[in-house]
Image: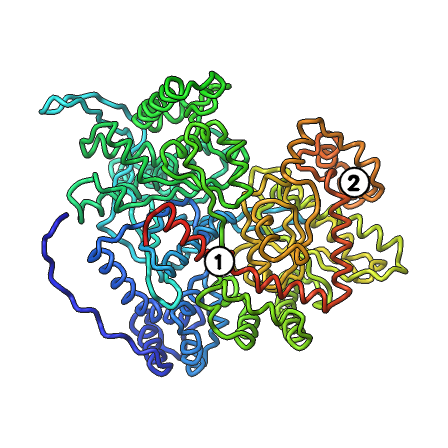
Amino acid sequence: MNTVSKPIIPSPAPRSSKPEILAEEIIERLTYRIGKDAKVAKPHDWLTATILVVRDRIIDRWMASTREVYATGAKRVYYLSLEFLIGRLMRDAVSNLGLMEEVRDALTSLGVDVNVIAGLEPDAALGNGGLGRLAACFMESMATVDVPAYGYGIRYVHGLFRQQLADGWQVELPENWLAHGNPWEFERRESAYEIGFGGAVEFITTHDDQPRYVWKPAERVIAAAFDTPAVGWRGKRVNTLRLWSAQPIDPILLDAFNAGDHIGALRESNKAESLTRVLYPADATPAGQELRLRQEFFFSSASLQDILRRHLQQYDDFTSLPDKVAIQLNDTHPAVSVAELVRLLCDVHGMDFDQAWEITRHTFSYTNHTLLPEALESWSVPLFERLLPRHMQIIYAINAKILIDARKGKNFSDGEIRSISLIDESGDRRVRMGNLAFVGSHSINGVSALHTDLMKVTVFADLHKLYPDRINNKTNGITPRRWLQQCNPGLTGLIREAIGDEFLDDAEKLRPLEAHASDPSFQQKFAAVKRANKVALSNLVASRMGVKLDPSAMFDIQIKRIHEYKRQLLNIIEAVALYDQIRSHPELDWVPRVKLFAGKAAPSYYNAKLIIKLINDVARTINNDPSVRGLLKVVFVPNYNVSLAEVMVPAADLSEQISTAGMEASGTGNMKFGLNGALTIGTLDGANVEMRDNVGEDNIVIFGLKADEVSKVRSDGHNPRAIIEGSRELAQALAAIGSGVFSPDDRNRYTSLIDGIYSHDWFMVAADFDAYAQAQREVDQIWTNQSDWYTKTINNTARMGWFSSDRTIRQYADEIWRAG
């Protein structure tokens, strides 16, 4: 270990948090950093000034956290994720520093409403859904439980698209979260790395007669670092989220510009900047696939170069890398890191292949988030070899080691060899990134107990046979700071009043709330908080969409990425069936219900976009039909993001977690809803299984086929037509949709969607419909007894503490990373 002494720089004195001091500092930042007089300052000016004052207090703790890691030699965790859905940061940071009241009072003294300016902060749209939000929760929890960590990702200029609706159809527009800068981030000019693509590989012999490969890329770009502090609860630790921006080596080709080719002169800039322009470029075209692979390698290579540079600052060589560094691959997107680390150790730092491979394998761990084969990325060998020729060589070398060991050491059959190979040869040769991440990691974890069990017998069955000690479970969690304390202050205050403050530091200390679940007085207060949250959501829907909602109705909410396996289609078909029943039997005591949907469909996913259109078509018909008498409303709220979730989650009475069993890895929306006092209706899929175990069978409504039953139905030959013909409500609902009742302008709009249910019903919509409809009527029965309803929902809040991401991170730290 290096022992070069450095001067000791004293830490600054703690800054005052008195409201009057904060107010003075806000005026100072407004004047000298933004250049505005308070008399003419606009709300966005006050927001930036406030962020700068809060940021200064974070920086003090950030630097102290960094110094401590260098002083103690603690192991660092590096979390590589293509997505970080971090949302707005001001309220999160202020709350975690314990300054919310002080900042509110300071701004009030200046005539500024903290809620107004906080609502102006852009959402950082750097993720698509659960995967990216999980990464953000993990960053906050790693700081909270005192694990030294860096998050690595891409600083997308536009990130995920902004969703608008045009006549019910999804329209994708750019999300401009960086349009006016980002006061939270710091550019790190010293942390810039060259990233190569293409070219050729040369074989040379070094001066000591050692063979060596040299990759000579045809293209190079610069990865420039931008750091954002990640503040833990009570400011105990501040970690770093480092996002990479792509920049050209030569920003302008001056000769071309002077020759009159003003557009062509910028082609290198445009090519580089396209790397970090948009999250998940559509990959239906070869150009889109290439850009996606370039993105993944770009951020993986930059992150690894940064990790190795930091390690060498403190240690003499890389033999200690697994002891001082833990790199977690969040899904398959950064899987190319396995080959890149081997390349850097061998080609740049002169290590032999076998030693580099052992160090790599003991440094990496891999989180799998899906059992869907199409989500386990693969790349065509010609594309991969053209773009990353040296990495293709390394992958073939790794594959040789694995397959020879399996054949000679474990006596694997031809079929098993084909299954574990890093190269899929079932059609055109493709590089299997899931297999590469698996063999290159010492730990592979699923994200719920069911998902982990299924991994062992489905997508990774033969790799599990080869390495039976690698797969383990780490059930996902959510940060209770954002998803209870910040998004639901009313409920947080009520809980504090009932059981004290211990749950603020340990979510599992919510358990004493059980004692209040059946107390009529507490139920009344709990119901009042829920109603206030529903009023807030109703106001948002009215302002955005012009639709009036009754807060007394049951708010039945499904918010998540639009995908056929998540079965928004099942939900809306049941809404059509309910609509028919309400009209046919007006004499019955129907429970007033509002079905709310939100979520984005991938731009190239036609059926998902068609489902959005169907929801909006059904909504238009039902909401304008006087015979329904307001008993049922359907609303699709556009542009789902973290900030919208923070309004919708606390307002939910019923949480829809209805994926096809065996297809949802975990789910974290289910946890957020449960923590905020919603009853869950769901299949036994993902983390719903563990939720049932934690909240109790009486406090969750489970329906439908289980994962093993889905597999059996598919293998035995599913006959959805017979099921549909045997279910009057389902048959009539499908007939109405398919015949154009909800699409009079295009009678055939939904023909293909309905035909898919009749012909194969892969996602078990028909198979589960009757059970789902029956479960919904069970929910109605519970709702009619409000005391019983609130007993169940209060118990949900009381028993959801185990699903804190703090618990998840402690398990990672203890059992995988050996850190913290």
Q: Nearer the viewer, residue 501 or 549?
A: 501
- What scheme was used to colour the molecule? rainbow
The quarter holding residue 19 reads: bottom left
Percent x, y of residue 480: 49, 62
Q: Label 2: which residue?
A: 734
Image quadrant occupied by the C terminus: bottom left
Q: Which of 693 and 30 is in front in this view?
A: 693
Question: How crowded is the residue under tag 2: few (<14 C-alpha within 10 Å), some, or many (20+)?
Answer: many
Q: Label 1: which residue?
A: 804
Percent x, y of residue 476: 49, 50
Residue for point 25% across, 27% down: 354
Percent x, y of residue 226: 31, 53
Measure how far apart labels 2 and 1 are at the Cα level: 40 Å
Q: Label 2 sits on what residue type?
A: Leu
Residue for point 73% across, 38% down: 767
Q: Which of 817 and 219 is in front in this view?
A: 817
Residue for point 51% across, 40% down: 452
